Amino acid sequence: MDPSRIPAEFPAPSFRGAQEQALADIRDAFAAGNRVVLVRAPTGSGKSLLARAIMGAAATAGEAAPSEATGAYYTTPQVSQIDDVEADDLLDDLAVIRGKSNYDCVLPGEHDTPVNRAPCARQQGFDCSIRHRCPYFSDRAIASGNRFAAMTLAYFMRTAGSEVFRKRDAVVIDEAHGLAEWAEMYATIEISPDRVPVWDDVGVPDVAADAGPEEDALDRTARFVEALRDVAIRAKDELVGRPELDREEVARRDRLQELISELGWFLEDYREPESPTTWVVDQSGGEGSPIDIKPLDPARYLRHTVWDRGNRFALLSATILSKEAFCRGVGLDPADVALVDVEHTFPLANRPLYDVTQGSMTYEHRDETVPKIARLIVRLMAEHPDEKGLIHAHSYDIAERLTERLGEFGVAARVRRHDRQNRDAELEAWKASADPEVFVSVKMEEALDLKGDRCRWQVVCKAPYRNTNDSRVARRLEDGQWAWYHRTALRTVIQACGRVVRAPDDHGATYLADDSLLDLFERAEADTPDWFRDQVDAMTTPSLPAFDPEAALAGIDASPSGGAGAGRRRGRRSGGSESGNAGHSSRGAGGSKAGDGDATGDSGTTDDASVRTRSERDAERRRDHPLSDVWGDG
């Protein structure tokens, strides 16, 4: 890598904001010998352009010996970020590759068949006469031979050890703040009917109750995993021995292969006395119920899937809040890592925070607070009659309750929401709409570019603390890792606040509705970036219009209409919210206590599981899972 090339490799015709200084600082950090450079760049600072400049410093084939790594990888956890890269003319020298399921077969009669279910995956020894025209293998060949290759983090991790995507001179990871959590999800083993094709062929024990006299739940789990792996191997071998498979059998074979590999990884690590990994086991239903096996220390997995893949690394994010904590979480020595802070150049007046807190949104207080937030949203709609708004509902349960209330208040004509199936379609429709719609969203705090009039105001409804029923969260809190707990919540809030202000001349307001958010700012103050602390310090309580549904609809051709109908786009319902009169907008009584996260499993993905079929839950889980881009690639 030649760090001196970094500024000249910047792909845009001119610099914006602090980009020029940032590139000089990144150059100097690599020139000083650091293998890894963390780039803490505020939202909207053009991180993808900085990434391309860094990639340009990677050695070329003409500069390196045949045995030396050349070129660069760009990877990010966010599929939407890869979409943006592919659509950006300034980044057209990055060759994008996706998982097989994103491509359709081009053989006659197979045009609706994804490549991972095509005849080459179904038939033993199938010799495709037009493989050179296959969109997947064509993109893969281009990306593997191109100086710069771009892919999701899921694809990047899955191709570790591949002869096609070998080690490169430089690796840039965009939106890298969640790398440790992604590694945990990558290494988590889900033993459930949805993920284990031979579920009906094994008896699932109660791993806590059935443990032997000198065993714990983890030991009993390991014994069960050994037996399960043997059953899976026999089932896989039987399928592999067939001359031809149908699509369902291909999916079963591929899932068995994945399962065998996952179980093998766990057993190998469990049996290794020197392994640094701490495993935790979740099984809430006892005998016959699903088991989740989760690692607390993903460094071993990152070493193989990430750190062995390049000579130098640049990790970019607005929310790497603590260098030392981040390095510990991903298996890096802070002494070998440099941190570059990029100045925030967006005027403070353009990105205001407003205190409109209505009370606590912890589970025990939610019935009281949600109606107040719904009334608040009506007042904000009146404050912004001609501007689009975004509601960060945090979970589908909260989104359901809010849209029910807004329907009862008669403002449904201006409200759009999504369900699990139409999430992307509704988001795109909302962005494309010329009407000042209010979009009630779930888990859209990251990787969403709402520049200009796409959105001018947003509401954060709940402090996004991690679910304390998650065994990894509970274990960390038992170990006193409260700073981590507050830091991860703050990280999500900062990401959310960056959705509506994307350039120095852009502007957008963020309204904070949960008392716990104010408590969070105090508890995580030491980890708060200066530029966000400035926003918090400048926060005020606005003077809003009175509750008036007619004023809330003044910007569209509609009048208030009562009833429980909620929104012009309705998802499948899981049952109405509890009825009752909405209270007046008011400040809740007192801040939250430490640890007021969702101890009820209210994660945005489980609240109406009882009315969804297994296939629907599986389809949802596959879409939302971080590895969905590569499942079934085999």
Image: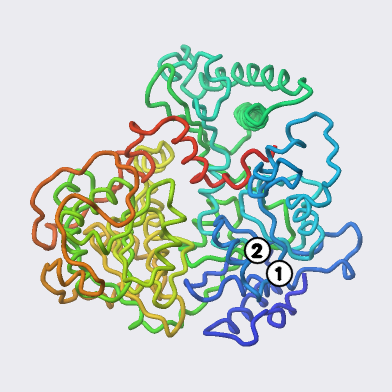
Task: Please state the horizontal and vertical placement of residue 263, each as a whole percent of the image.
Answer: 61, 28
Q: Quadrant of the N terminus?
A: bottom right
Res. 612 image quadrant: top left
Which residue ends up furthest to the front in the rendered image? 109
Which residue ends up furthest to the bottom in the rendered image? 14
Label 2 element class: strand
Q: Is residue 19 left or right of residue 578?
A: right
Q: Amino acid at mark 2?
A: Val
Q: Residue at x 12, y 67 (%)?
A: 547
Residue 303 visible in rendering: no
- Where residue 172 is drawn, which disc sits there? 2
Q: Is residue 72 left or right of residue 441?
A: right
Task: Please state the horizontal and vertical placement of residue 126, each as a whole percent of the image.
Answer: 83, 34
Task: Please state the horizontal and vertical placement of residue 395, each as a whole percent of the image.
Answer: 33, 49
Residue 188 visible in rendering: yes
Res. 246 image quadrant: top right
Q: Quadrant of the C terminus?
A: top right
Position of residue 514 relative to residue 246, above or below, is: below
Q: Are marks 2 and 1 in contact (CB under 8 Å)?
A: yes
Q: Residues within 10 Å of mark 2 (few under 14, many from 20)?
A: many
- Where residue 55 is drawn, which disc sits there? 1
Q: Is residue 135 left or right of residue 336?
A: right
Q: Amino acid at mark 1?
A: Met
Q: Between residue 333 and residue 609, name the one nearer to us.
A: 609
Q: Residue at x 72, y 53 (%)?
A: 309
Label 1 element class: helix
Colour logic: rainbow
Q: Between residue 7 and residue 580, name the one nearer to us.
A: 580
